[in-house]
Image (cartoon, rainbow, N blue to C red):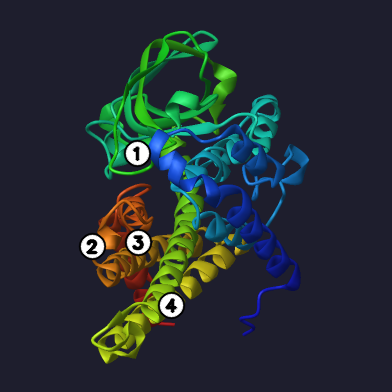
Amino acid sequence: MNFQLPDELVIWQHRVGEFVRTELQPHDASIEETGVVPESAMAGLRRMGLFGTNTPQEYGGLGLSMLGSCLAIEELAKAHTAFYYLSGVNVHIGSKAIEFYARPGIRDRWLPELASGRMIGAFALTEPGAGSDAARITTTVRRDGAHYILNGKKIYITNAPVAGVFTVFATHDPGAGAKGISAFAVDATTPRLRIGRIVEMAAGRGSAHAEVIFEDCRVPRDCLLGEEGQGFGIAMRCLDAGRTHWGAYCVGAASQLLGYALDHVSQREAFGRKLRGHQGIEWEIADMTAALHAARLVAYEAAWRYDQGDPAARTAAAALSKYTGAEMVQRVADATLQLFGGSGYSKDLPIERIWRETRVVGILDGTSEIMRQIIARDTFRRHEHKNAPN
């Protein structure tokens, strides 16, 4: 088993890392203050191909493996989270349903726009009464000749105010559960689709989360993704990609935090010596390093599993990576803030911002509780297969 990254991916990761340091991180403080992402930074994200790292080259993407995409996300996570929400999310839940399930004309229309960053996509699944239990969505859809008609409301939809196209999930029959759900690619300019209230979040300045409301919204039948009733499966496949990327995001954010912590304890003195000279601090650094290393291995394996194409292994590995990453990055963020003390809790330093930004990973794209459920069910499945009579 070779743990060495291929040379071309090492070069790619270093290239993205340099871009993040020189062109993105200098804007972190101003984005947090103003909530505005500079156009120069957006242009840089487009130039680097970060809106379409894992999108096929034939549609304008970089065509990287999931591992190559995750290496880019790991570096992107070292800057303000707005950059990831705007570009990284485009790679998975913003575009994967269209990439895998759209009719050729719909795919050819939207995917190059998404991969290039000329347009941003949004994933409209969550509703006020349906979060983790996505099969309970109540946004309805019915056929009407050559169209489908959507009615309902989504909430907490990332990038909704700036999206050009939505992947929308709606049910033909609320009583049918997952089997009644279909998915659609919906142009943001479609009449009777409107953006509702923008929801202020604890973190994520520079990106927006909002309600999306459908009131007798007519969508051409060609915009159906896959077949009727396949929507729940489509959503889960998109979330596999999202969860794999979030695992890598956690690794990048924790790496940045650990770097801050190492610099701080190497420079700050207390009780006559550097903080790093105190055994308790050494142990804290060791724990952070061990947790980060373990999560990185899980994240890279999840990316590799995704690339192998086994759906069951892909789903389980993605859940394990997101769960492991979410737990790890919050421990590292909390420990780093504690090491910095009052200055870490203040807004003078980026520690508290990253602390807030990373907390949401245990909630979005499937809560940590749902990830644990997926992991446990996969564990039972493998145990039963192992012990099944020959």
- Does residue 249 lie above or below 168 as drawn? below
- Tell me, for residue 294, which label it has, or none: 4
Q: Tell me the residue that label 1 is attached to.
A: 178
Foreground label between 2 and 1: 2
- Which amino acid, by three-letter code, is at mark 4? Ala
Q: What residue lies at 51% left-to-right and 8% top-to-bottom?
A: 145
Residue 342, label in figure:
2
Relative image position of residue 313 (x, y in whole percent):
49, 65
Circle 1/circle 4 CB separation < 8 Å: no
Q: Secondary structure at mark 1?
A: helix
Mark 4 vs mark 2: which is more N-terminal?
Answer: 4
Q: CA distance from mark 3 to mark 1?
A: 27 Å
Please state if 345 lies on the left or on the right of 99 as rendered: left
Task: Estimate how packed mark 1 is, as few (under 14), some (14 to 19) or many (20 or more) residues with alpha carbons within 10 Å.
Answer: many
For label 3, the residue is: 326
Can you tell which of label 1 and label 4 is closer to the viewer?
A: 4
The disc, 3 or 1, on the residue closer to the chain's N-terminal end is: 1
Mark 2 element type? helix
Q: Nearer the viewer, residue 238 or 272?
A: 272
Above or below residue 3? Residue 123 is above
Residue 276: image x %, image y %?
Answer: 35, 85
Q: Is residue 149 left or right of residue 368?
A: right
Label 4 element class: helix
Q: Are marks 2 and 3 in contact (CB under 8 Å)?
A: no
Real-space Cα distance between discs 2 and 3?
24 Å
Give the amino acid type for the residue marked by disc 2 in the picture. Answer: Gly
Q: Residue at x 45, y 40 (%)?
A: 31
